[in-house]
Image (cartoon, grey):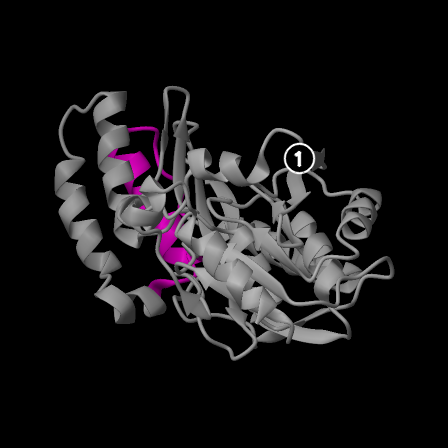
Amino acid sequence: MKKLAKLLQLVFLGYIALLLGSCVDEESYPDTTQGNFEALWRIIDEHYCFFDYKQQAYGLDWQQAYNIYKVRSRGNLNSYQLFEVLTDMLSQLRDGHVNLYATFDNGRYWKWHEDYPTNFSDTLQRRYLGTDYHIAAGMAYRILDDNIGYLYVGSFANSIGESALDEIITHFAFCNGLIVDIRSNGGGSLTSAETLAARFCQEKTLTGYIQHKTGKGHNDFSEMEPQYMEPSARLRWHKPVAVLTNRGVYSAANDFVKCMKCFPQVSTVGDQTGGGSGLPFTSTLPNGWTVRFSACPSYDRNRQQIEFGIAPDHLVNQSEEDFRQGKDTIIEFARKLLVE
């Protein structure tokens, strides 16, 4: 895992060096409506990493976007109007890692989860957790009445300590199986996601591949570099695991699912994840606004794209009848799966 983190660090350092080295040749733009439009379009055109994939997936045409939004950006636009135009243009990328930041708003694309059923309810979850559950490193956990462990990881934004994971695994030591619920986990730190995943890894395992940009062309990438996970040197979980997912699982949480699917004792249950496999980078427009975008694509162990999500092993949706009865359909399916 430390080797993977070091690899990612080297990838980013190499990418930053490439950008800095190319600054001399990059055209500068004035702080005008048209200048900011041209600067943003060019930044994305030269450094975004999913053009070919998204052209194949849904027909993305970035040049056509230029032609359309260049017209919209003409005239004496105020800051709010320009922000709307630029955000609309970026939304053509359909990427939750693409954001435009101004002092008055954050431009974002959230349809990766907004257009789908939630498949997660705080109300139902409270019925399973009760009031006497444990909390460690931001994770909630308890043993259900059928001797199945339940661990909810709502975010990877916080650091996950090794000692906390030792305590959690010890608490579940006599359980027959473990549910790891990451529904609506929007991501956070890759290191936190990998620290947790390493507790389920029993041997050095190929988990995926990564590339980085080597030039300004849409297809200028390095060769695919393999990513491996090393098993944790601390306590590890060997029994069956069900990872619960929905469309709200994104970014580092999506990467967590990518890794967990490589382990033989793990099954994924629920809906497809939201995706977000591009490692983000940032740049600045002439007016000081910041744009974040996907710069380095990552893939699963079969070299397949996971930008638009990872399908579960068992597709299960929350039913209205179960909801009325106070049951979480996805949790109940996982409990049965773990005792078969």
Query: Residue 31 vs residue 189: left or right?
Result: left
What residue does disc 1 label? 133
Residue plotted at (35% across, 69% down): 53
Q: Quadrant of the rendered structure where residue 132 is?
A: top right
> What amino acid does circle 1 point to?
Tyr
The rendered magenta stretch, by its main secondary structure, is classed as helix
Q: Compared to 310, does 324 lie above or below?
A: above
- Residue 311 in view of the camera: no
Q: Position of residue 308 (x, y in %)?
A: 38, 61
- Taking depth in this image into account, of 79 and 157 the one nearest to the observer is 157
Query: Residue 340 vs residue 165: left or right?
Result: left
Residue plotted at (53% across, 67% down): 337
Residue 34 within the magenta-colored segment of the rendering: yes
Task: Say which quadrant the N terminus sits in.
Answer: bottom right
Query: Residue 91 vs residue 208: left or right?
Result: left
- Taking depth in this image into account, of 9 and 237 the one nearest to the observer is 237
Residue plotted at (30% across, 36% down): 35
SS under mark 1: loop
Residue range corresponding to the magenta coloring: 27-51
Q: Position of residue 137 (x, y in %)?
A: 72, 37
Q: Residue furthest right?
A: 233
Q: Position of residue 65 (x, y in %)?
A: 20, 52
Query: Residue 237 vs residue 212: left or right?
Result: right
Q: Compared to 84, does 196 lie above or below?
A: below
Residue 278 within the magenta-colored segment of the rendering: no
Q: How many numbered circles does the render carry?
A: 1
